Amino acid sequence: MTATPTPVTDHPVGVTLRDVRKQFGDHVVVDDVSMEVAPGEVVSIIGPSGAGKSTLLRCINLLERPDSGDITVGDVTIHPETGVSPKDLTSLRRTAGMVFQSFNLFPHLTVLRNISIAQERVLGRDRKEAEARSRELLARVGLAEKADTYPTRSSGGQQQRIAIARALAMEPKVMLFDEPTSALDPELGLDVLEVMRGLAGEGMTMIVVTHEMHFAQDVSDRIVVMADGRIIEQGPPSQVLTAPSNERTKRFLRAVTDR
Amino acid sequence: MIYVQAVLLGVPMTVLITVLAFAVGAVLGVPLALARRSPLGPLRWGARFVIDVLRGIPPVVFLFVIYFGVGTGVIKLSSLQAAVIGLGLIAAGYLAEIYRGGLLAVHKGQFESAAALGMDSWTSMSRIIGPQAFRVALPSATTYAIGLLKDSSIASTITATEILYRATASSRGHGAGLEPFLIAAVVYIALGAPLAWLSRTMDARMRARVAR
């Protein structure tokens, strides 16, 4: 990775979820989950598929609107039940950056424009300033040479690093990662994980839904295990991964490690 | 040769009707397509109703209604105005559906990442979703433009002095029968060919760029 770490966050903030509930039809996907993430803390959420991990993460920046519960990110508190003002929505999303499993880069824009456009349209930076910042972030994720190409010319791992740079360009104070390496070949995922490690090292608050047990073990301060829409166990990686107390966690970890 | 000259006299009017009607349709199609996707039920149903009506009336009937109906009453319309309004409204109905197809082709993740970056729905639509949908819609829209070029001949029925009108007049005036119409056919093909070429080129270019 390029060795010019630009600090990406001065003041990481915490996230508090209180009794967050989300159901699709009759199916309760997130079942009254409460969770507190401290500023600068790195939390990995693991668990079997269908556990509600991604939905919970997407509730934090309201890509999914919870049916009930409160969400606090930094100094913005949202009560989805009583409606969300556009102002709160914008400030929530500016505070929380998100990286998706399928990258979701904008295919009609160059890599540089991908990273610059929201800086201009949302933060109101002028084009020159935005593009300078974009180049800086691209260098940071080791992809300076890709600036003027279109995203589809890059490999999956490169696209995901570009997506991370795009999220960082908004100067988020929390980063949400939704299975950032699940769509990648194992080797391509390594560079992405390396960038994420760097961010964690700089004190960024991170909530990561992942199947990467090594990453969860090495980088997170805490691991949260979800099943059937609930948190069934949580604690420091050493405890959760090596001495889990919950039967369901044990079964899940066996399934993961026996591969 | 006199037939060629006579038929060519109609080219400016044909081009004018086609270009203006397409412009009307291209602009009015946008709000129709967006209304068709609105979360508000009545707006959605209203847009669908308008689109179905516009697409359900034969162009010739529509032009007659506008030219002889509206045109003879309080508001007086020239044949050009009536043709542009009539064909333009019909084009809006078709183009709205073409745009809608384009919007449906944009991956859900694009809406989500624009939202996650804090973009409001206007910015997201105008900068991220719209341009991608437009690219998908472009080949179909061009194909529609070629159809519209041919449909503009219907305006001859309301005395717009376009190609078919000139060919008919010259055929009647000189008792020439078939020849002016054959010339008209060749002229339509010649006018449509660049559009067809444009459509294929843009399609190929778009596919090359966003190939995944």
Image (cartoon, coloured by chain):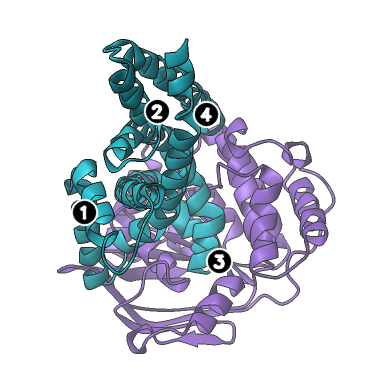
Q: Are marks 3 and 1 in contact (CB under 8 Å)?
A: no
Viewer-proximal residue among A26 and B173 = B173
Tell which circle, 2 or 3, labels the residue nearer the N-terminal end.
3
Q: Please give the label number shown on residue B202.
A: 4
Q: Which of the chains bears the disc numbered 4? A: B
Dot 4 falls on a residue whose secondary structure is helix
Q: Amino acid at mark 1?
A: Val
Indicate which label's residue lies in the foreground, 4 or 2.
2
Instruction: Tell me whether the residue at label 2 lies in contact with that at label 3, contact meaning CB atoms closer than 8 angstroms.
Output: no
Q: Residue at x 64, y 46 (%)?
A: A161
- Looking at the picture, do discs 1 and 4 lie on one chain? yes
Mark 2 to mark 3 CA distance (whole Å): 49 Å
Q: Position of residue A136 (x, y in %)?
A: 80, 52
Q: Is residue B94 left or right of residue B186?
A: left
The residue under label 2 is: B163
Q: Return the mark for residue B119.
A: 3
Q: Which residue is mark 1?
A: B65
* Corner quadrant of residue B164: top left
Sooner in the amino-acid sequence: mark 2 or mark 1: 1
Q: Nearer the viewer, residue B11 or B113?
A: B11
Give the drawing colour for chain A.
purple
Q: In the depicted view, which residue is nearer to us: B188 or B113?
A: B188
The disc, 1 or 4, on the residue closer to the chain's N-terminal end is 1
